[in-house]
Amino acid sequence: MKKKIEKGTIVRTAVLTFALINQVLMISGYNPLPFTDEDFGQAVSMLLTIGAALWAWWKNNSFTQAAITADEHLQKLKG
């Protein structure tokens, strides 16, 4: 059976390609993005905050004793 390339692999490759092209253009003296350094810093901060929020939301955050016990039981079943 032929396996498909994961979407995450494609996205990471596209982001890396964009970053490399941007870096080469900046080294050549051309700023392809019409942003100031301050705008870029704010955007990076916002992306990190959104990423951290999504990651924390997505992960299984068990706070109650029942949920923690259920997680342990699930791990035993998987193992």
Image (spheres, grey):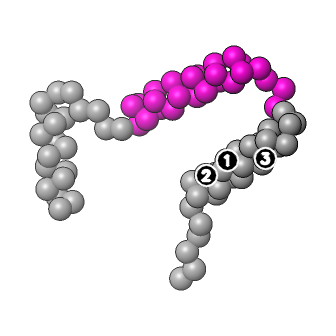
Residue 35 among those drawn in magenta: yes
User: What amino acid type should be assigned to the residue bearing mark 3?
Assistant: Val
Q: Residue at x 51, y 32 (%)?
A: 51
Instruction: State the separation of the CA atoms marked 1 and 3.
Output: 14 Å
Disc 1 marks which amino acid? Val
Residue farthest bottom in this picture: 1
Q: Earlier in the sequence, mark 1 or mark 3?
A: 1
Magenta stretch secondary structure, dominant: helix
- Residue 15, position as x, y percentages in the image: 67, 47
Q: Amino acid at mark 2?
A: Arg
Mark 1 secondary-structure assignment: helix
Q: Assess whether mark 3 and mark 1 are in contact (beta carbons under 8 angstroms).
A: no
Counting from the top left corner in percent of width and height, residue 55 is at: 43, 35
The residue carrying mark 1 is 15
Range shown magenta: 33-58
Regarding mark 2 in the picture, which secondary structure is present there?
Answer: helix
Circle count: 3
- Residue denoted by label 2: 12
